[in-house]
Structure formats: structure tokens, C-alpha cells
């Protein structure tokens, strides 16, 4: 079988001494789907950057079509060689139409003007050929996440790619949308396209890929046909040891009501934040899961609960107090903790030290000094304790948050939020984009908090995670709660899908 891409003893050491890749060697064969698994910081992104011309290896060679990529290898050269990539965070322009996004940068012209009819015809032709149904004239801002992903794939295919790299492509899709995507990818593979599929979800890797390469600490620890490896073996290759699945086994006695939301309505500018008549309740010791395709009001709900948005109607009772008039700081003093969906934009400051990020809300309790004066020595001792307790892999608490891998940054922020004896925790996508070990660690901590009496509101696009942790599940669609479900044996990711797509209600 022909090797389309080859990595031959590829190593990468950055000027600051960080070693990202250590003698990586394997091949990706033409017409196959090749999965790459590994922890955050294992070297997956760096390896893809060497393939895409964004990084130059310190040693070794990358070959494309049997030809070594030279020192002038660049993203433009990679694209010319037929390599395309669909990133986890889309690069579409929301205000443009589907057709305008697909032809952006290579627009067909008629005289001095863009030939919009030709652009629409090209998109229709591509959509029919690759079975990716999209409407060329629709603005991207109005599309669902799954539809936007189709546009991203069409945008890559329009450039005559032979190799398509997909980075965590199912992170925000329902099971039905994931299966539809996989059907399309299988069709593309049958047409001769080669696919590199980066994922943390072993079930999806097994469903799509024929071959898997595992990276750990910049080295290849496994490279074999997927049929030769069971999930436990792949997890062991990823982590270097066995990792047990985290699942809530027992439910403690229900405590006092920690949160009650009634008739909550938010007429936000962004449709993704809007809510209508949302109501739910949550008790101490309970984990309530919130399922839904992203953009169906979950972000608006979190914004209202954390004090970042003021609703147009409704009430919120939090830890026995009417909360809407309370500031975010007052809610935190009352016992609210928040692990946000974006660990950098909302959870921490990339350029500040780990110490500053670890004790960022400590002034509210007075434990580290009297506001506005904080004891630096106490802060550094506290940060060191949290780093040790949460197994944050770092050299010194003085280094910046940006220097950590995604999983370690998430563990540091979780340590800050979990360690203050919270009575109510909002955990928003707590394990998104992090590796198996870090995800298992955070899930275990969520269970421990609930067992200690904390009420946990868990929002997650990972339905396996939601069903392994939650006692009950509510589903949001178009800003409303459309289902309230007990988490029993009958509740599966497939059973949640119709509610998430608005095809079924059980509210």
C-alpha cells in the first residue's frame, strides 16, 4: 500500500528547551483513515504542524508523496501538495454565505467582478459529489454546528485535497450528527481520500479508523491496525498505565435545594444565548446534567447563573437566597463555584503565573490576607498545595498558565474552583479537549464533591460523560428545556439525540 505521508525520525525541540517530539516515525497510507491518539502535550499538534508546514522539525524528515519536505515547506506548499485541515474551532466567516466561504481566497470572476453564480454552481457540484448537502446562499451564521462543519469540509475539498486532517471533529455533535459525519467520511474514503482523524474518543476512533498511532511524551508508543488493539490497550499506550473508567456508582441522600430556576427568559443579541421559560431545580449531593447541541441556550443559562447576564424575566434562587440582585462576587461568597467552558477566555489569564491563577478568587475568603493586601508567601504555598493535590505537571508555580498543556491548565483551574468547599458548582464542558487521564481525574473530583454534599450542574457535549456522572438529565433545544429524564439503563446517547435535535419532547 502506498504511503502518502511519512514521518521519519522526526524530532522537535524549541529554543526554550521544551522537547515536543522525540524520533517519531510512522506512515499514513493512501486511501485509509488513520487515527492519532494521545494526551494533551503528547505532540499531536506539533506533528501536524510539521506536516502542514507551520513548524520545521529539529531533525528527521517529513515525506509527502515520497518526496521529502524541504526547509521551505510552508502551509501554501502543503496545500499545493493536496493537504487540508478542518480545525476543532471553525475558521468560517459567519457574515458570509456558504458559497462565499467555500471560494474565499480563490473567487471566480467575470471581468472585474466576482462571479457569484459560478461560486454557487461550484458549491452545488461539490455538495452533490461528496454528499454534503448545504445551501450555497445561506449565511453561515444561521447554520447549525453540524452544517458549519460540512461547509468546512467542503471548503477543504474544493481545493482538491488528497489528505484531510480532522481535529476532534465530533466535539459538539449529537450521536446522530456524528454518525452522519462518519457516513460522509466513509464515502470520501471510498472515493480515495486519505483521512487523519485526531480524537480522544476511543469508540469513535474504532468506528471510523483502520489504523491508529498513539503518541505519549513526544514518542510513538503504538502504531498498528485498529483491529489488533482493544480499548484498554490503546488507553494504556496513551497513558503508560491502566486507566479505569469513572462512573458514579452510588447516590448520596439528597440535601437541601441549592438551586431553583423558574420561568427564566433571556432575549440575548446572540441567538445561541437566548432562553424561554427555563425552569429546573438542583439539590445538594446531586449531579444534574444539561445536554444539548451547543448554541441552544446553555451559554445564556450559565451567564445568568454566574451573574454575567441579567434575564428579561424569571427568578433564580441560589443556596436559599434570591440571586438575581447579587453580584458575581456575592454569589461566590455564598458558595458558588464555576468551572467555565473556555479555560483561557473565562477561566484563567494565560500571561499570569500559576500562582496568580490558582489563588485568583482567594481575596473573597480572606484566607490569604486582608483585602486588598494578599500575602505572596501564603499565595505561593497555597498554589503549590493545589498543584501537588491535582497533579498539575509543571516545573514551578511561577511559570505562566500559557506554558501548560490544555489538560494541566484545566486541572489548575479546577483545583482553584473545587478547593474552596463549594456548595453549588457549575461545571461547563469540564473535560473538553483534554486527555484521558486529566478527564478521568476531573470526573472523579466531581463525584467526590457531590458525595460531600455539593450540588453540581454539569453541562457537557460528551454524552458518555454526562450519562456516567449525572443523576438526572435535562435537554435544551432552541432555548427551552424539552426533556427531563432520569438517568437509568434506558437512557443512552442515542436516546438523547432526538431531544437534542428538537424531534421529540419529554418536558
Image (cartoon, rainbow, N blue to C red):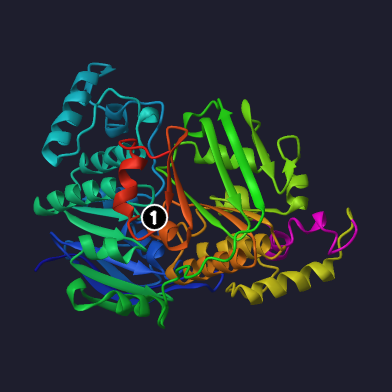
Q: Where on the picture, by quarter, is residue 424?
A: bottom right
What residue sits 43% from the left and 76% below the top?
217
Q: Is residue 64 above or below residue 164?
A: below
Q: Position of residue 131 (x, y in %)?
A: 15, 39
Residue at horizontal 14 percent and vertical 54 percent from the top: 189
Report whether residue 115 is seen: no
Rendered-image quadrant of the C terminus: top left
Dominant secondary structure, magenta: loop
Say if the magenta span includes residue 354: yes
Is residue 5 shown left or right of residue 503?
left
The count of marks equals 1
* Magenta span of residues: 351-370
x then y, percent, for residue 151 = 28, 37
Residue 192: percent from left, percent from top:
10, 53
- Left or right, residue 2 beside residue 438: left
Residue 196, located in which quarter of the rendered image?
Answer: bottom left
Q: Is residue 238 above or below residue 357?
A: below
Query: Most extreme residue toward the bottom, as rendered?
Result: 241
Q: Is residue 25 visible?
A: yes
Residue 479's x, y, as percent?
Answer: 47, 33
Residue beneath label 1, please? Answer: 463
Amino acid at each position: 500500500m502506498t504511503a502518502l505521508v511519512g514521518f521519519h525520525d522526526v524530532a522537535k525541540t524549541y529554543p526554550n528547551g521544551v522537547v515536543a517530539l522525540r524520533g517519531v516515525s510512522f506512515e499514513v497510507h493512501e486511501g485509509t483513515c488513520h487515527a492519532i491518539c494521545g494526551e494533551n502535550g503528547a505532540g499531536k499538534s506539533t506533528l501536524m504542524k510539521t506536516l502542514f508546514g507551520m513548524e520545521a522539525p529539529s531533525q528527521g524528515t517529513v515525506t509527502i508523496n515520497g518526496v521529502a519536505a524541504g526547509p521551505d515547506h510552508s502551509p501554501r506548499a502543503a496545500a499545493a501538495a493536496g493537504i487540508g485541515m478542518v480545525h476543532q474551532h471553525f475558521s468560517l466567516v459567519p457574515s458570509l454565505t456558504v458559497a462565499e466561504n467555500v471560494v474565499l481566497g480563490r473567487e471566480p470572476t467575470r471581468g472585474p467582478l466576482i462571479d457569484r453564480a459560478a461560486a454557487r454552481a461550484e458549491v452545488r457540484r461539490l455538495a452533490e459529489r461528496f454528499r454534503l448537502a448545504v445551501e450555497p446562499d445561506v449565511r453561515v451564521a444561521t447554520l447549525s454546528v453540524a452544517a458549519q462543519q460540512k461547509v468546512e469540509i467542503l471548503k477543504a475539498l474544493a481545493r482538491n485535497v488528497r489528505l484531510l486532517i480532522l481535529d476532534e471533529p465530533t466535539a459538539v455533535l449529537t450521536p446522530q450528527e456524528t454518525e452522519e459525519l462518519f457516513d460522509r467520511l466513509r464515502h470520501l474514503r471510498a472515493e480515495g481520500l486519505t483521512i487523519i482523524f485526531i480524537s480522544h474518543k476511543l469508540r469513535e476512533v474504532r468506528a471510523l479508523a483502520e489504523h491508529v498511532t498513539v503518541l505519549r511524551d513526544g514518542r510513538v508508543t503504538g502504531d498498528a491496525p485498529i483491529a489488533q488493539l482493544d480499548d484498554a490497550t490503546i488507553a494504556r499506550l496513551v497513558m503508560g498505565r491502566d486507566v479505569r473508567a469513572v462512573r458514579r456508582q452510588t447516590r448520596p441522600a439528597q440535601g437541601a435545594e441549592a438551586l431553583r430556576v423558574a420561568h427564566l427568559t433571556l432575549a440575548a443579541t446572540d441567538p445561541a444565548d437566548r432562553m424561554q421559560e427555563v425552569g429546573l431545580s438542583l439539590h445538594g449531593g446531586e449531579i444534574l446534567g444539561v445536554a444539548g447541541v451547543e448554541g441552544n441556550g446553555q451559554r445564556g443559562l450559565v451567564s445568568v447563573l454566574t451573574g454575567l447576564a441579567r434575564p428579561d424575566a424569571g427568578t433564580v434562587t441560589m443556596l436559599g437566597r434570591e440571586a438575581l440582585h447579587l453580584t458575581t462576587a456575592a454569589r461566590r461568597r455564598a458558595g458558588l463555584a464555576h468551572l467555565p467552558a473556555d479555560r483561557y477566555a473565562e477561566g484563567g489569564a494565560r500571561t499570569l503565573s500559576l500562582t496568580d491563577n490558582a489563588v485568583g478568587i482567594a481575596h473573597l475568603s480572606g484566607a490569604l490576607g486582608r483585602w486588598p493586601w494578599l500575602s505572596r508567601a501564603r499565595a505561593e504555598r497555597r498554589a503549590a498545595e493545589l498543584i501537588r493535590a491535582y497533579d498539575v505537571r509543571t516545573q514551578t508555580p511561577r511559570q505562566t498558565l500559557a506554558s501548560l498543556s490544555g489538560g494541566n491548565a484545566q486541572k489548575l483551574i479546577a483545583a482553584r474552583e473545587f478547593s474552596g468547599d463549594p456548595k453549588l458548582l457549575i461545571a461547563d464542558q469540564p473535560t473538553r479537549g483534554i486527555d484521558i487521564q486529566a478527564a478521568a481525574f476531573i470526573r472523579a473530583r466531581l463525584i467526590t464533591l457531590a458525595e460531600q454534599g455539593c450540588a453540581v450542574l454539569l453541562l457537557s457535549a460528551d454524552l458518555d460523560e454526562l450519562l456516567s456522572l449525572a443523576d438526572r438529565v435535562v435537554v435544551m433545544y432552541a432555548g427551552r428545556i424539552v426533556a427531563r429524564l432520569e438517568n437509568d439503563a434506558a437512557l443512552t446517547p442515542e436516546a438523547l439525540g432526538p431531544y437534542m435535535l428538537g424531534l421529540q419532547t419529554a418536558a
